[in-house]
């Protein structure tokens, strides 16, 4: 069916009936813009509107679909009229139905695209917001305090940047001190929210959590000696302390290496023979935990899932090799020996 022909037919019969587009729209219960689109051949009416539209124009549905008034004659035109009444309206009706179906499909496709676009935008917005804005608890030292106007701020280091945190009403700004009377840095537990791009945020709570002892990297611990494995005398000590980047509370947990060697403890390093080097641990001790008459090395690891590992002489004493096995717990006495310096300090506090 020709859209232009169909639109012209509606316009002609509307005018012949003395109706405006608004009048026709009111009778069919659509907007005058919809009638305008029909007459300008921009769209077809919905199939469900054909009967009320034809009635408003004083037509039959078959006449509307045929785009012409049908005058029934009983002479030689009878066959032609019958064809017009049956074939052309039916064909036009099918075409109109197909056109409406295509229009609905296009509308559905665009609605689906719009919905997916909105979902994608919402997802990307959520990802961006979560990756930009962080809320959590920090447990570390404060670099500096600052008051600007009537607002108080704390500066805290985070991954190589200084967080500029505005203090909320729950923060006692005046009671916060960066160091104690001995010059050791004080650590605080802070509930914070900040922007990872601007490094600005707020702190809603700030509680003292402990004292960070002087730099562990500069501390020298005593060298000890004991019977160990198949040796009558083994020297051992901790060395190379550094902050655990994943330890909690942050900045107060230090890891170290434990070295075990034979030879005099005060000779040059090239004259020592290291028999065991345990790296990245919290502490270590020599003890006969299995009561077999031989000492073992018990190491406290940095992993809460596997907190202890034991280095022992293998069962075959003819073979001088060191075995390793894991423990989930040790005696209270050994737990105390394996405490870190920070834990001992906190216990004294």
Image (tube, grey):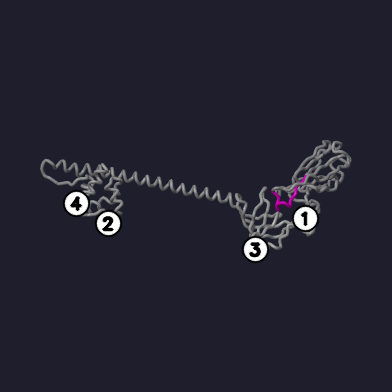
Query: Between tags 3 and 2, which lies in front?
Result: 3
Q: Can the viewer see residue 333 in this picture? A: yes
Near mark 1 (Cα within 10 A), the count class, few <14, some 14-19 or many ≥20, is some
Q: Are marks 1 and 3 in contact (CB under 8 Å)?
A: no
Q: Which is nearer the N-term, disc 2 or disc 1?
A: 2
Q: Which mark is residue 26?
A: 2
Q: Which residue is mark 1?
A: 184
Numbered label attached to residue 168: none
Tell me the CA gap for discs 4 and 2.
17 Å
Is 25 above or below relative to 325?
below
What kind of element bears circle 4? Answer: helix
Mark drawn on residue 16: 4
Q: Earlier in the sequence, mark 3 or mark 2?
A: 2
For marks 1 and 3 on the same chain, the one whose residue lies earlier in the sequence:
3
Left or right of 162, for residue 254: right
Who is closer to the viewer here, 307 or 159?
Answer: 159
Dominant secondary structure of the residues highlighted in magenta in the image: loop
Question: Residue tagged by mark 3?
Answer: 170
Mark 3 surroundings within 10 Å by alpha-carbon count, few (fewer than 14), some (14 through 19), many (20 or more): few
Percent coordinates x, y for residue 62 in the rendering? 21, 47
Residue 288 visible in the current orientation = no
CA gap between label 1 and label 3 equals: 25 Å
Q: Residue at x 21, y 48 (%)?
A: 12
Q: Is residue 323 above or below residue 143?
A: above
* Residue 87 x/y as whole percent: 22, 42
Mark 2, secondary structure of its residue:
helix
- Determine whether, in the image, residue 212 is placed left or right of residue 5: right
């Amino acid at each position: 069916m020709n859209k232009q022909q169909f639109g012209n037919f509606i316009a002609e019969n509307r005018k012949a009936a003395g109706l405006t587009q608004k009048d026709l729209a009111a009778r069919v219960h659509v907007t005058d813009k919809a009638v305008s689109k029909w007459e300008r051949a921009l769209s077809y009416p919905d199939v469900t509107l054909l009967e009320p539209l034809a009635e408003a124009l004083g037509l039959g549905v078959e006449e509307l679909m045929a785009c012409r008034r049908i005058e029934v004659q009983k002479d030689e035109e009878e066959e032609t009229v019958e064809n017009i009444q049956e074939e052309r309206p039916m064909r036009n009706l099918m075409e109109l139905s197909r056109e409406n179906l295509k229009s609905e499909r296009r509308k559905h496709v665009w609605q689906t695209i719009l919905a997916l676009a909105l979902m994608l935008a919402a997802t990307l917005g959520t990802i961006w917001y979560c990756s930009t804005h962080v809320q959590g608890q920090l447990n570390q030292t404060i670099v500096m305090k600052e008051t600007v106007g009537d607002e108080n701020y704390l500066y805290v280091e985070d991954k190589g940047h200084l967080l500029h945190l505005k203090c909320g009403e729950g923060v006692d700004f005046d009671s916060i001190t960066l160091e104690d009377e001995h010059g050791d840095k004080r650590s605080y537990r802070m509930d914070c929210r900040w922007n990872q791009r601007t490094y600005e945020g707020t702190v809603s709570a700030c509680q003292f959590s402990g004292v960070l002892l002087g730099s562990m990297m500069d501390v020298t611990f005593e060298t000890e000696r004991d019977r160990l494995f198949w040796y009558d005398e083994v020297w051992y000590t901790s060395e190379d302390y550094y902050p655990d980047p994943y330890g909690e509370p942050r900045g107060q947990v230090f890891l170290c290496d434990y070295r075990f060697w034979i030879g005099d403890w005060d000779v040059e390093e090239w004259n020592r023979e290291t028999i065991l080097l345990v790296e990245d641990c919290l502490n270590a001790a020599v003890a006969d935990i299995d009561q077999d008459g031989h000492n073992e090395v018990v190491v406290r690891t940095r992993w809460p899932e596997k907190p202890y590992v034991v280095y022992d002489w293998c069962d075959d004493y003819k073979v001088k090799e060191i075995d390793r096995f894991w423990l989930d717990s040790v005696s209270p006495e050994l737990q105390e020996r394996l405490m870190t310096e920070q834990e001992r300090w906190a216990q004294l506090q």
